[in-house]
Image (tube, rainbow, N blue to C red):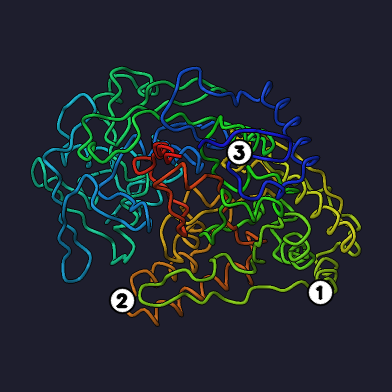
Amino acid sequence: MRLGVGAPGSVPGDPHPSRIGPHRLFTLLLLGAGALLHSGCRPADRPADLVIINGAEPESLDPHLVTGQADGRIALALFEGLTRYDPRTAEAIPGLAERWEISTDARVYTFYLRTNALWAPGEPITAHDVVWSWHRILDPATASEYAGVLFYLKNGEAYATSRLRDFSQVGVAALGPYSLRVELESPAAFFLDLLAYQPYAVVPRRQIQAHGDRWLHARPFLASGAYTLDFWRLNDRIRLRKNPHYWDAARTRSDIIDLLPCVSPATALNLFLSGAADIVWDKELVPADLVADLVPRPDFHTFDTLGVYFYRYNVTRRPWDDVRVRRALALAIDKRRIVERITRGGEKVADCLSPPGIANGALVYQPPAGLRPDAAEARRLLAAAGFPNGQGFPTVVYTYNTQESHRKIAVELREMWRRELGVQVELRQLEWKAYFRAQSMLDYDLVRSSWVGDYNDPNTFLDLFLSENPNNRTGWRSAWYDRTLRQANAEPDPHRRQGLLQTVERFLVEDQLPVVPIFFYVGMESYDTNRIAGVYPNLRAEHPLRAIARVPPQPSAPR
């Protein structure tokens, strides 16, 4: 049966009704009810097969422009690439391409598209659409922050950075309507996984050329994925409708899905417990003070994930251009205090950027040790940089986006830096879009950040800080880092590659510190497995919407 609110502190069908005490849950539901009136998170006025609390209001649904995880989940339901994610493992499986061949040197791929792959109105999706889509995201005029994901294509980076003007020299070409040749700069063991990621999604040329920036509003909506966009009502919901022309429509499990924008953990939990939502994604929508009460519940799920929480320095500003200052602030942080007192979800302290257990071809990657807290060394470095006991140090502005957990972490960091270094910190909270804009424009001193891996390889974390990667967002550049990371990715021997990757990561998090890792995420999601099928825990927390459905109620046994 569907979860609903019964007596305070109990949920019908919950075998452990006392796991959240009556007073705690009653207070939470009162808070949630109040927030519900003001947040825009309200139940659908028409029934949907599935209702999901998805996080912040999307910045865009254009797969070449989205930057947030909440945006990307929806974009991947609307637009597909040559491969797609397996719902159980998040590994790459055939998508718009039904098969492919790989050259002996692993640099050339030949893809064969499905002849039954159609745009939502019924027009064929061809290899020319793929070429045009990849041209669009690499075009400097598009200004995609994820263009760097296509730098693995031969001459992809040169074209995106305007060093090359002729796109025909980029390593992608249609061999015919349904075949495609792709050439890489060097072998990339994770390339098929990359193709499932939204920057490689195929978008409708005709619609974009006809309507420009408003192409997502045009009708009919031209989707290449399992769903079409029914409507998007700001601060209300996004409704997706099953795409009858999708090549795998017969196995798309839900006809209508509503995704509600919500950033209030109390409101999200209220909607879930009241039965107004079937699923709540993301740890950020879990009330931090209720984690211990929620963990034992059978409808609350935790799992390891490829995610890291960190902050960035803007190294184009003083005093952050001095590595001694960056190192001093990093050494003054007691990360264990943050995970034990604030996040409290079983997160592991992060002294490096790559999470433990990440794959590296046939090996399990072993990241470098990173830095350990050392307040005395932090004070010595700050004095050597000209700021003994914090004297003369400018007021620091630490920026974070609207989430209570981010505010609590920011407050804790402020107190550590004041106590250990005499540094004064002001906190700046921005809503989601302004927060991303501030990072992109380098309009910050320090900014809280996070990254969830796009594929199961250390490179998904390390290539963020290549000089030309738009996701760098620190102003930090290193020709040695760029050259050595590219050398690592071209190295066929997994042991030598691991050594190079370790050297690169050590340089990033121990020597240069444009970023400071704090902890590795633990995935947290709410859904009742008796009510919802098709959600499988995996390292990437990737749950394709096409695979998820509400389980039909079972008839009661005769008495």
Q: Which mark is residue 377?
A: 1
39 over 336 or under it: above or below: above
275 over 153 or under it: above or below: above
Tell me the quarter of the picture where residue 109 sits.
bottom left
Badges 3 and 1: C-beta atoms under 8 Å apart?
no
Return the x and y of residue 515 as percentages of the image width and height: 63, 59
Q: CA distance from mark 1 to mark 2?
A: 40 Å
Going by the numbered disc 3, the residue's amino acid type is Pro
Q: Nearer the viewer, residue 225 or 287?
A: 287
Return the x and y of residue 44 as percentages of the image width and height: 51, 22
- Dot 1 or dot 2: first in sequence order is 1
Tell me the quarter of the picture where residue 202 sits.
top left
The residue wearing badge 2 is 492
Point out the frontmost of discs 1 and 2.
Answer: 2
Q: Nearer the viewer, residue 140 or 398?
A: 398
Q: Secondary structure at mark 1?
A: helix
The residue wearing badge 3 is 12
Badges 1 and 2: C-beta atoms under 8 Å apart?
no
User: Residue at image x 11%, y 47%?
Assistant: 179
- Dot 2 or dot 3: first in sequence order is 3
526 over 79 or under it: above or below: below
Return the x and y of residue 544 as percentages of the image width and height: 38, 45
Q: CA distance from mark 2 to mark 3?
A: 56 Å
Point out the frontmost of discs 3 and 1.
Answer: 3
- In the displayed image of the protein, which residue is found farthest to the left? 176
Q: Is residue 97 left or right of residue 220?
A: left
Q: Secondary structure at mark 3?
A: loop
Are there few (<14), some (14-19), or many (20+) residues within 10 Å of tag 3? some
Going by the numbered disc 2, the residue's amino acid type is Pro
Q: CA distance from mark 3 to mark 1?
A: 56 Å
- In the displayed image of the protein, which residue is found farthest to the bottom? 495
